[in-house]
Amino acid sequence: SASAAPLTVTILHTDDLHGHVDPVKVGQGTYGGYARQTALVRRYAAQDPNPLVLSGGDTFQGTLYYNVYQGLADVLFMNYQGYQAMAVGNHEFDNGPEALARFAQKAQFPLLASNLDLSAEPLLRDLVKPYAVLSVGGQKVGVIGAVTPDLPLISSPGPNVKMVELAQSLNASVKALQGQGIDKIILVSHLGYTLEQEVAKTVPGIDVIVGGHSHTLLGTFDNKDFPPSEGPYPTIVQNPDGNRTLLVAAWEWGKVLGRLKVTFNDAGAVESYEGQPIVVSADLPEDPTARRMIDTLAVPIAALRQQVVGNTTGGLNGAREIVRRRESTMANVLADAALDAAQKAGATIAFVNGGGVRSSIDAGPITFEEAITVQPFGNTLTVLDLTGAEIRQALEHGVATWSENKGQFLHVSRGMSYTFDPTRPAGSRVTAVTLNGQPLDDAKTYTVAMNTFTAQGGDGFDVFKNAKGRRIDTGTLDIDILVNYLRARPTTDAQNEGRIVIQNEP
Ligand code: ATP
Ligand code: ZN
């Protein structure tokens, strides 16, 4: 091996920050926020041996800061904290290649995705690279990027961004680095914990995977506010070289900061390691410069965010593990609001993709900020004529991946109901569909409202993309649809009323 000598580095990492500039409530506590995160990163970067500050991607999407700044607020903090590389996440494409290019131009660190072919995308081909070589402690460390192969299905990269087969692109990047005599290799990965374990097992040459996308909490925490950890930190996987690959992740929203000390031996393999995510708790000091930056950035959104647009007595549940698997009160409200907005266009049904419901709303007054946290994408509403058979096919697609909590799970507006059996083979799970008490007629045409993302085939809805019937983009924004609906009633309360019935739930 070309390695000079053993090397100890300290990887400080985040992923899935999703625009969470401000701290968030978890259980009884408050966690995260860029002011505290900045203080921590800068402190450890100054005291730990050979710091490497890395991101597992998905900086974009999730709060009003994103809607107003499209990542250009976050990149200021990333530069100031000294990030050295970032994986491109799927959400980095939510506003198309243009917004990612603006972010990348400002970033003082490389953006990485080895499994994208950007040669046909002039906005990005010079800004996003497969890998980078960093200089740490007088030695070279290779950092490769990867993004979920689902990207074209779940975001908006446009026609010029092509996926490359994952294993092939990772192997090519590892070989290119090894060809330069670099054998300490880190993958910054927006692939999710499951696929990351698979990569660790099958792709030789990768020593550490800094993960993202699945919002995975790893480590041991004695904290009642936190959900159960999903595995050890680091998770150790035997790699094809006979060495160990260390897998780490830092949950979501900056609530923890990953911190892993790794010693490589003189053959470039992991010799020892030590680490545990740091809880970014409210008793930690804030970085004063970061605090001033936040105060300035918050000015244009302060009035907007606090505006009360409605009220709910019982709260509306749009939690990720609910809304991607079963009927949800938040999704019912969104579907009904979409139906109302599309009634002029003759719609009698509205669909909402579960993954498009980004949050719950808690009981009490509803602020504009809460509403936009639920509907941040800036989708317009499309109205589409579909046959009963196409509708049935769409519902089948929605439950085809039921056990995986994917975004394609479909919610329906009032008056519609469907039953499915997840124990049956995918493609024949939907056992009944009714509209206002009548069975759906396969041969009849129905006018259906849905967001433009799904209408254009997002979440794998080829049936919507390929539908030949009348298609109208109403131009009405999802956030306006929700806000109008909330404003129109003194209180918005919803029930789970059997719109979606699960038979034989395992
Ligand atoms: P992460 O934040 O780590 O990417 P996530 O929940 O956002 O986690 P996924 O589980 O892949 O990531 O969710 C992406 C889902 O978001 C898609 O499956 C889709 O349902 C939804 N989505 C993405 N873009 C849009 C959009 N423009 N409109 C509506 N829904 C969207
Ligand atoms: Zn993601």
Image (tube, rainbow, N blue to C red):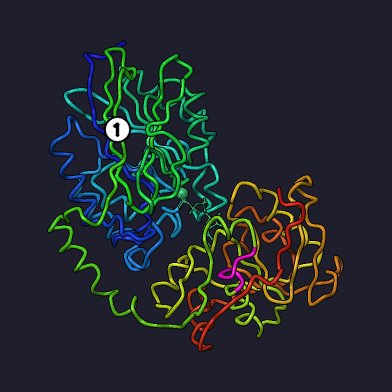
Where does residue 112 sit, x and y in percent of width and height?
37, 40
Residue at x 80% of width, y 50% of height: 428
Residue 55 quadrant: top left
Q: Tell me which segment is drawn in magenta.
A: 327-332
Work out which quarter of the rendered image holds the N terminus and state it.
top left
Q: Would residue 116 be visible to someone looking at this image? A: no
- For residue 484, side relative to residue 30 (left or right): right
Q: Would residue 393 be visible to someone looking at this image? A: yes
Where does residue 357 sit, x and y in percent of width and height?
53, 64
The rendered magenta stretch, by its main secondary structure, is classed as helix
393 above or below 312? above
- For residue 78, side relative to residue 431 (left or right): left
Q: Which of 462 and 9 is in front in this view?
A: 9
Q: Nearer the viewer, residue 457 or 430?
A: 430
Q: Does the stretch in magenta take in 122?
A: no
| Ligand 1 has an atom within 8 Å of the beta carbon of the residue at disc 1 | no
Residue at x 84% of width, y 71% of height: 444
Q: Specify the farthest residue to the top.
A: 1
Where does residue 251 sit, x and y in percent of width and height?
39, 46
Badge 1: few (under 14), some or many (20 or more) residues near its Cα, within 10 Å? some
- For residue 131, side relative to residue 331 (left or right): left
Circle 1 is placed at which residue position?
Answer: 275
Residue at x 41% of width, y 52% of height: 92
- For residue 406, side relative to residue 499 (left or right): left
Q: What element carries label 1?
A: strand
Name the kind of residue labelled 1 in the image: Gly
272 above or below 149? above
Q: Nearer the viewer, residue 465 or 212?
A: 212
